[in-house]
Image (cartoon, coloured by chain):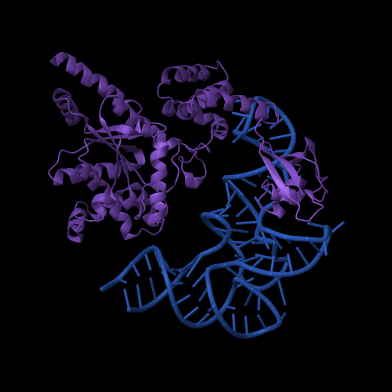
Amino acid sequence: MTDAQRSREVERQLEIMREGAVEFYGEEEFTKRLALCLKEGRPLRVKLGMDPSSADLHLGHSVVLMKLRKFQELGHTPIFLIGDFTARIGDPSGRNKTRPALDVEQIQQNAKTYVAQVAKMLDVRSVEVRFNSEWMDSMAPSDFVRLCSQATVARMLERDDFAKRYAAEIPIFVHEFLYPFVQAYDSVALEADVELGGTDQTFNLLMGREVQRSYGREPQAVITHPLLVGLDGHEKMSKSLGNSVGITDDAVSMYGKVMSIPDEAMGEWCRLLSAGEWGRLVTDLSRLGEGEGDPMSLKHALAAHIVTRIHGEEAAGGAQAQFRSVVQRKEVPDDVPSVEIGMGGREPFKLFEVLVEAKLAPSKSEARRLVKQGAVSIDRERVTDPMKVLKLEDVLIQVGKRRFARVKFMT
RNA sequence: GGAGAGAUACCGAAGCGGUUAAACGGGGCAGACUGUAAAUCUGCUGGCCUUUGGCCUACGGAGGUUCGAAUCCUCCUCUCUCCA
């Protein structure tokens, strides 16, 4: 490769690395490092950390995972760091309350599922999967204290999330201050050249640069990405807020969830989740801005795109067909689950009892309410009497728009 | 260590001796409408029952006062603020 070719390649890679990013800290020095790495044929070490505090990754995580994949495709080394040690602290980032620390078993369970989920988006065979307990568990207290001398309390309190909590008189525990140090030290231990993250991680990410410097390393470049808004269209996507689309969601519900985002959120979703199809979705989006095309078909395109990426084209097609049929035309889906109800000599069965038995309602009171509200139909006929006694025949019961079950009574 | 303030349902937040399963808002669920599980409007939103009614559980924890307590008293736990 000639020098000219190499500098074009550096430019090409930088372009990809910048795509969709909010900030690229340390870009200048990084450019030099990238050039050197290309010259020496050495891949960059690209770190992405995740806190295994929940068992599921969601589309919000996928934004940054896709970026990691871009690095992988460019021939660099993706490092997926599972913060099993840090999960025991609880990341305060973006929080307005203390994150509960998890027990070790729960964390390990979650960590396992993470790798499987990441495999849906990256070629995990060439991903370096690491746990920060590897180096944190054995760190001597004296070393840890030295690590914590890298920043002042005043500096910590400048952080937006802490500042807000402090102003609002919401508790901030001392251990929450420790999180950024650990995350920063991870970059030292992993010899990271680049770290990726959401904008809410900016403080922790930049702390990595400082700590690397003080440990005599080249500071990593930091590339931050926008946070994806959740299904509500306001809050950032998060499982605990209940507004997320899980990577492990099945194709049908994933499709439906995407269809349920507010129209206003579509633009951002298209921009952040359209990797690979950037052009088409954005063109459609701008046409929409000019009053051409309709929001619904764009939303369909977005939903199909997202589901395709995670579940494949076939599943996405099926999900789309099912959405059109069940939601838009109010038809019965093909794959209605069958539920068998054992009699146990307890006949006759009243409707509200059957709803609970068939897991169509969480409690009998709730079941009664649903029936009274006109949410329940038997064999497509609306029924409003919860006390209705069911004949012991197989029936199709529907609750609301999309909860179905074929109920069979077993003697 | 001292002095104040506070802890209410999924979340935020009223209530400050009875008519409070607890106002109001958010969230969730349902119905109507629709271009979608968007938006908008309406209703519901602790559990169990033989249901225009009955019972059980619930207002940080444990006791107490009272015919009756989320509401008053005592102790405890936790948080916030100020002082040292």
Q: Is residue A202 above or below residue A20?
A: below
- The picture places residue A135, in percent across and down from the top left corner, at 23, 51
- The picture places residue A108, in percent across and down from the top left corner, at 38, 50
- The chain assigned the colour blue in the figure is B
Using the rendered image of the protein, determine whether residue A39 is visible from the camera's viewpoint: yes
Figure colour of chain A = purple
Q: Is residue A237 above or below residue A300?
A: below
Of the pair B65 and A136, the residue shown nearer to us: A136
- The picture places residue A119, in percent across and down from the top left corner, at 39, 34
Q: On the rendered structure, is A302 left or right of A199?
A: right
In this view, which residue lies farthest toward the front?
A411
Q: On the rendered structure, is A242 left or right of A322?
A: left
- Residue at (18, 14) in percent of width and height: A5
Q: On the rendered structure, is A234 left or right of A47?
A: right
How many marks the image carries: the answer is 0
- Residue at (27, 24) in percent of width and height: A74
- Residue at (30, 35) in percent of width and height: A127
Using the rendered image of the protein, determine whether residue A227 is visible from the camera's viewpoint: no
Of the pair A116 and A75, the residue shown nearer to us: A116
- Residue at (80, 42) in percent of width and height: A393
Of the pair A116 and A174, the residue shown nearer to us: A116
- The picture places residue A73, in percent across and down from the top left corner, at 30, 25
**Quadrant, the N terminus of chain A:** top left
